Amino acid sequence: MCAGAGVGHDGAVKQQTANAWEPVVVAFGGKIYGMDPASGARVWSYEADASLQRRVRLGVDRGRVYALMLGVLMCLELATGQLVWRVEPAGYGDTFLVRDGIIVFGVAGEVSAYAAADGRLLWRDEFKGKGLGDVALAFAGAVAQSDATG
């Protein structure tokens, strides 16, 4: 199968381009699904390890899905749901944003950034002496708010 193509539940290949079909991504209970937004058909699924099957936070950027589950950050291909990489950032935060190839992750008053291409750590700021707490993050036009209830 060529890059940028996905296989539907009926076995048909769906070609993906910048302005063409893209799945809507749905996640719960440690499972992530790509669904055809017009028909509701599931076109791919990804199931995390049993130890991670709880709350899922999602981000989508540049043809990839980013998921955060219990301190594990992973990247899937948007078209196929195939795992690209998986990393374990410091701490069990549940706040992150992804934009322009950078993932910003927050936990307990600390913030770090990861390369969306491969999950490698780009930088980290522990905000030493500034206190601890839930982290809210923002890019222009995008906000991830964290609070004690999730």
Image (spheres, rainbow, N blue to C red):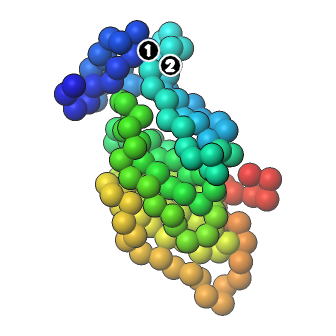
Instruction: Pinpoint residue 7: horizontal percent, then vertical percent.
Output: 35, 20
Camera-nearest residue between 55 and 103: 55
Residue 137, compared with residue 60, is above or below; it is below
- Which quadrant of the rendered structure holds the N terminus? top left
Labelled disc at residue 42: 2
Relative height, residue 28 to residue 55 (above, below): above
- Residue visible at 59% across and 60% down in the picture: 71
Q: Residue at x 55, y 71 (%)?
A: 90
Q: Is residue 112 left or right of residue 62?
A: right
Q: Residues within 10 Å of mark 1 (few under 14, many from 20)?
A: few
Tell me the residue that label 1 is attached to: 9
Q: Residue at x 43, y 14 (%)?
A: 9
Q: Is residue 37 above or below residue 127?
A: above
Residue 56 position within the rendered picture, expressed as x and y whole percent measured from the top left: 62, 45
Measured from the top left, where is residue 93 in percent x and y?
A: 63, 63
Q: Is residue 93 visible?
A: yes
Give the amino acid type for the residue marked by disc 1 in the picture: His
Q: Residues within 10 Å of mark 2 (few under 14, many from 20)?
A: some
Tags 1 and 2 touching, CB below 8 Å:
yes
Q: Position of residue 132 (x, y in %)?
A: 71, 77
Q: Quadrant of residue 117?
A: bottom left
How far apart, in angstroms, are the residues tagged by discs 1 and 2? 6 Å
- Give amino acid for label 2: Arg
